């Protein structure tokens, strides 16, 4: 058996060398199918299937808070955390954490960094051990601002502190306050969120010192995330029951917890808020990658069937000389496996290269988002399995041809007969299946592109990011008080207005579609019951300066903008959007009306609706408060200019450094800053676009192979037709009629399937609809171009037939 196998392999390698064009086509096709699945599976494996590298990860659960049917959030309040931590009987530990910016100063160098504020039991609950020094624990906390300690991430330790082994015990300044470095976290540890890579961890009890305000005693301030470790033997259902029993007690005791319930999910993507959409998207793309592989298999099956037909005389002679049909079939399968393994190896190589590029990609210049996706043992096993299965599959496709062939008739009839049969063959069926799949994938990619153009249509954003340069900083990082922050911001706006080319300047504590968003319950004027169920709206909240609306080009529909006189001595005022006005007042004409939010506020302006949390959201309420009445150290300076963006950015950098050289800041265009918000749409379009491109390439090779085979098998017939006076269009119809018929039928079938898959596409792409006329026309044009490209060379070959030479050779 071993000798026979070695003999088959040697013979298969000789056949590959004898047909390099055929071998290259098969290897490329296989590489496309396997490579697409390697990339998608690696991302799916890293983000969904493979648990985080934490001890006992299966016992870790993320708490999702539900206030009502429309209010599901990962954010919790610290008082609720304390109650759940102390009253539950299902967790061995419950830890809290919160993401925030911080200014890190060491050896005279200031850096704007990202940190986790964490409860004292954070590292104990997660079960990790430091690579250097120690972590902080509950015993290190003795009340507010009592634990001035920091734990560095491994990457921050290496890149910013040069891996200083003596860093433990040294002091670094965080927002101008001294903190002692206790230790360094292990390499690769990034907490419980896959998308976020912090630079350091500090105890949460210091938040007043670092942030300038306290949320530790505010039950209505939701800004922390909770992760618990289940006790041995406790199920998720039992844990949810216990948590909701506690929630029922809290609802009775506290107005802020009205409607509170809990659910549990896996850590990694802020619970169900991002986890659900991420899983849907990745499984949907995995399905499309499977369709690419299926199309590749159909293509290869058609190619091997055609190759077996071309080798009919060779196999007939071998059978006449004593070879068995089984041996010939084993030889064909061996050749197919060799080509499949080579194609799979190329696909893994290309896929691994693309995965490394994806791991180095940072979609946002101001937020540490990075996806660590690599091909691991699971990926290689998948690639090997796909290659073997596909190799056996398309190696067995010619089995019926081999088994039913009559060696005597084949040798007697010669290799080139007249292929006048009109019955459907296996090659026809495989090609049509491939074209249907290709049409579905091309439809998906065009739907994604249409969705992306809608997502990038900034006319619905409620602001215009083009032409705006933004600088982000937190004045707390430079040690400013609230009063000093307000004075600095005012002077900064006046100075920025003097930059050449600047047309508008303003600032806000955060901008729409930024990650650091906040919202608040709003009540109608005269309300006395402040349970959340009695709220008029849950509105997005922004603290903005005079001039912000002009810098953002947010249209003021009625009323007036803020002025510098709207300070803490003036009556409290607000500007609201149209949706807010409709929900709270029942009309968009809200000027002079009042609502309740931290006191009674008068509406002085109404602006257009926009996008605030994400670009796919329905219209939501938003309100803007004057920063002079609600001081904020968090500052996003918006400078709109008609001058060159690089010149404006350079002038802003000089201005900020001239005003305070110790203030860390980041600078980018507003369009660049929207990268995180637009990331889902871009990722979906990129993924589906690649799938459509791969499918188109497979369709070209499939139709080309079928057309070439049809022409080569009918050269004698075509020569006779031309000798008898047939016209060129008649020759083309005879030579390419069957492949073009299959293209038309397959494309129509693909459009039908694509229309039926609307729900699947809608779960992947924003505003997806395959019934869009532009998409339908695009698919028809694309498939027509695919057919023209694939049939071009076979058509030229058919028209170049010389009847006299061909008939003389026959």
Image: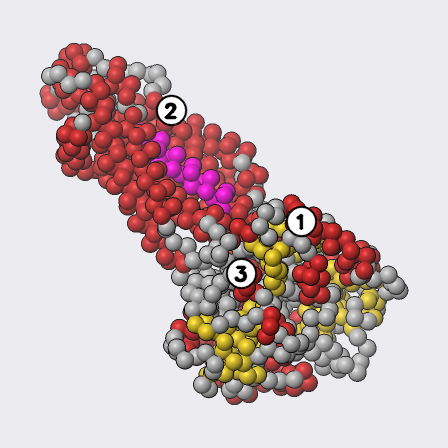
| Total numbered labels | 3
User: Which image quarter: residue 36?
Assistant: top left
How crowded pointer 2 is (Cα within 10 Å; few <14, some 14-19, many 20+) is rated as: some
Residue 343 seen in the figure? yes
Q: Which residue is mark 1?
A: 240
- How far apart marks 2 and 1 lie (CA) works out to 52 Å
Please name whichever residue, 666 or 493, is drawn nearer the observer in this view of the structure: 666
Q: Nearer the viewer, residue 575 or 485?
A: 485
Where is residue 462? Give x, y as percent.
64, 62
The image quadrant where one finds the C terminus is: top left
Q: CA distance from mark 3 to mark 1?
A: 20 Å
* Disc 1 crowd, CA 10 A, few/some/many (<14, 14-19, 20+): some
Closer to us: 749 or 126: 126
The residue that appears at 46% across and 86% down in the rendered structure is 108
Is 14 on the left or on the right of 502, as rendered? left
Q: Which residue is mark 3?
A: 126
State how far apart marks 3 and 2 are (Cα).
55 Å
Q: Position of residue 654 (x, y in %)?
A: 49, 84
Residue span colored magenta: 282-301
Q: Residues within 10 Å of mark 3 (few under 14, many from 20)?
A: many
Q: Give residue 232's mark.
A: none
Write down the residue under mark 2: 429
Please tell me whether mark 2 or mark 1 is closer to you in this view: 1
**Is the residue 439 above or below the residue 661 in the image?**
above
Q: Earlier in the sequence, mark 2 or mark 1?
A: 1
Q: State the image quarter where residue 551 is shown.
A: bottom right
Q: Could you tell me which secondary element the residue under label 1 belongs to? A: helix
Residue 300 highlighted magenta (yes or no): yes
């Amino acid at each position: 058996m071993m000798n026979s196998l070695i003999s088959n392999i040697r013979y298969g390698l000789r056949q590959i060398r004898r047909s390099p064009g055929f071998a290259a086509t098969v290897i490329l096709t296989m590489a496309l199918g396997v490579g697409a699945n390697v990339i998608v599976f690696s991302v799916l494996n890293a983000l969904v299937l493979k648990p985080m590298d934490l001890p006992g990860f299966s016992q870790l659960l993320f708490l999702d808070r539900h206030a009502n049917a429309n209010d599901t959030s990962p954010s919790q309040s610290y008082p609720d955390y304390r109650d759940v931590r102390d009253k539950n009987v299902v967790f061995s530990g419950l830890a809290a954490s919160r993401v925030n910016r911080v200014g890190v100063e060491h050896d005279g160098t200031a850096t704007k960094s990202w940190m986790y504020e964490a409860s004292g039991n954070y590292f104990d609950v997660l079960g990790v051990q430091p690579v250097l020094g120690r972590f902080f624990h509950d015993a290190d906390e003795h009340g507010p601002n009592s634990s001035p300690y920091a734990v560095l991430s491994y990457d921050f330790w290496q890149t910013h502190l040069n891996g200083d082994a003596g860093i433990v015990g040294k002091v670094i300044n965080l927002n101008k306050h001294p903190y002692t470095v206790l230790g360094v976290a292990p390499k690769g540890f990034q907490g419980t969120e896959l998308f976020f890579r912090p630079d350091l961890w500090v105890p949460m009890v210091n938040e007043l010192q670092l942030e300038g305000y306290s949320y530790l005693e505010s039950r209505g301030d939701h800004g922390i995330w909770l992760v618990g470790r289940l006790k041995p033997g406790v199920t998720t259902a039992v844990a949810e029951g216990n948590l909701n029993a506690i929630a029922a007690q809290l609802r009775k005791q506290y107005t802020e917890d009205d409607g509170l319930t809990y659910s549990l999910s896996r850590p990694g993507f802020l619970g169900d808020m991002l986890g659900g959409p991420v899983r849907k998207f990745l499984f949907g793309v995995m399905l499309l990658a499977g369709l690419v592989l299926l199309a590749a298999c159909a293509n290869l099956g058609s190619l091997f069937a055609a190759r077996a037909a071309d080798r009919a005389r060779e196999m007939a002679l071998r059978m006449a000389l004593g070879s068995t049909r089984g041996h010939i079939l084993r030889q064909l399968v061996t050749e197919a496996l060799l080509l499949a393994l080579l194609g799979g190896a190329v696909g893994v190589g290309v896929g691994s290269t693309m995965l490394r590029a994806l791991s180095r990609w940072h979609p946002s210049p101001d937020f540490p988002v990075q996806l660590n996706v690599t091909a691991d043992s699971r990926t290689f096993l998948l690639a090997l399995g796909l290659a073997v299965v596909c190799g056996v599959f398309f190696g067995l496709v010619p089995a019926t041809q081999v088994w039913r062939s009559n060696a005597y008739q084949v040798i007697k009839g010669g290799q080139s007969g007249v292929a006048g049969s009109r019955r459907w063959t296996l090659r026809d069926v495989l090609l049509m299946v491939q074209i249907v799949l290709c049409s579905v994938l091309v439809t998906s990619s065009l739907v994604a592109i249409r969705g992306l153009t809608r997502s990038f249509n900034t006319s619905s954003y409620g602001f215009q990011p083009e032409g705006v340069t933004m600088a982000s900083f937190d004045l707390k990082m430079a040690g400013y008080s609230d009063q000093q922050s307000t004075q600095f911001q005012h002077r900064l706006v006046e100075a920025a207005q003097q930059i050449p080319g600047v047309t508008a300047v303003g600032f806000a504590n955060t901008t729409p579609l930024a990650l650091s968003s906040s919202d608040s319950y709003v009540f109608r004027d005269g309300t006395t019951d402040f349970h959340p169920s009695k709220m008029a709206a849950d509105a997005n909240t922004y603290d903005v300066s005079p001039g912000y609306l002009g810098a953002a080009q947010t249209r003021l529909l009625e009323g007036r903008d803020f002025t510098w006189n709207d300070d803490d001595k003036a009556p409290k005022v607000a500007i609201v959007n149209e949706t807010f006005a409709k929900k709270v007042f029942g009309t968009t004409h809200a000027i002079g009306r009042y609502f309740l939010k931290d006191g009674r506020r008068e509406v002085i302006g109404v602006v257009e609706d926009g996008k605030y949390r994400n670009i796919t959201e329905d219209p939501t309420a938003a309100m803007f408060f004057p920063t002079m009445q609600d001081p904020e150290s968090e500052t996003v300076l918006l400078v709109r200019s008609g001058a060159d963006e690089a010149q404006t950015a350079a002038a802003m950098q000089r201005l900020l450094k001239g005003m305070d050289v110790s203030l860390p800041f980041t600078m980018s265009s507003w369009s660049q800053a929207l990268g995180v918000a637009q990331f889902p749409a871009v990722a979906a379009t990129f993924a589906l676009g690649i799938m459509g491109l791969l499918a188109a390439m497979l369709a070209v090779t499939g139709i080309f192979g079928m057309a070439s085979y049809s022409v080569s098998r009918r050269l004698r017939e075509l020569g006779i037709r031309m000798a008898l006076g047939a016209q060129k269009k008649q020759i083309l119809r005879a030579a390419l009629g069957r492949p073009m018929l299959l293209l038309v039928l397959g494309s129509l079938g693909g459009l039908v399937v694509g229309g039926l898959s609307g729900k699947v596409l809608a779960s992947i792409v924003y505003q997806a609809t395959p019934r869009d006329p532009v998409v339908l026309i695009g698919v028809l044009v694309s498939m027509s171009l695919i057919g023209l490209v694939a049939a071009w060379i076979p058509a030229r070959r058919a028209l170049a037939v010389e009847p006299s030479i061909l008939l003389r050779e026959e």
